Amino acid sequence: MTKLSSRAQRQQGSIMIESLVAILLFSLGVLAFVGQQLSALKYVADSRYRTEAAVWADTLIAEMTVAPQGTLMAQYAGGGPAFVAWRNRVMAAGTGLPGATVANVTLALAPGVTPLSFDATVSVGWQVRGNEQAYGAGDQLGGVYTTTTTLY
């Protein structure tokens, strides 16, 4: 058996350490990439729900636009029958908006536009199941879409 030189003895196992460090750095890079992908999925879902809420709010505004002007307050303000029907459609299972919540529609006379013009404000909220806290508290996925328009 030949004796290894002192220099060779000092470097024995260095390739193993270099390999372990390389694997560690590669693993950290993969973990960072996976974290970014999960974050991107969250934002894509949030964008989808926000769009869905906007469609529901615009649907109600479209229904209010074609409703007879004299019946607008009775049908949509304060839980009128047309509002309740729309709210039930939004909150029904399978609408694409998880945990949908609907605030009451606000109708207020809009002075100066026409004698019976109304400013209508519609809010539609959502919350992904399992997130018990309100949106904005931490990293919860949910929110509220609000739109205002003048009718007539």
Image (cartoon, rainbow, N blue to C red):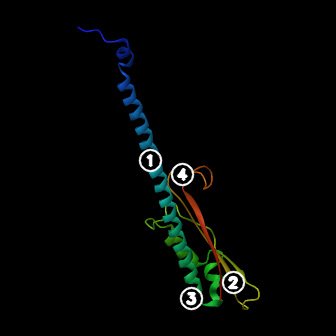
x and y percentages locating residue 6 in the rendered image = 37, 12
User: Marks 2 and 1, how far apart in space?
Assistant: 50 Å
Q: Upstream in the sequence, badge 3 or badge 1?
A: 1
Q: Upstream in the sequence, badge 1 or badge 4?
A: 1
* Nearer to the camera, 30 or 7: 7
Residue type, mark 1 in image: Phe
Q: Which residue is mark 4?
A: 131
User: Marks 1 and 4, how far apart in space?
Assistant: 25 Å
* Nearer to the camera, 142 or 80: 142
Graded by Cα atoms within 10 Å as few (under 14), some (14 to 19) or many (20 or more), the crowding at tag 2 reads many
Q: Which residue is mark 2?
A: 118
Q: Are marks 4 and 2 in contact (CB under 8 Å)?
A: no
Graded by Cα atoms within 10 Å as few (under 14), some (14 to 19) or many (20 or more), the crowding at tag 1 reads few
Graded by Cα atoms within 10 Å as few (under 14), some (14 to 19) or many (20 or more), the crowding at tag 3 reads few
Q: Taking 12 as reference, is 89 above or below it?
A: below
Q: Which residue is mark 1?
A: 33
Q: Which residue is mark 3?
A: 66
User: Marks 3 and 1, how far apart in space?
Assistant: 50 Å
User: Marks 2 and 3, how far apart in space?
Assistant: 13 Å
> Quick check: 13 left or right of 145?
left
Q: Secondary structure at mark 3?
A: helix
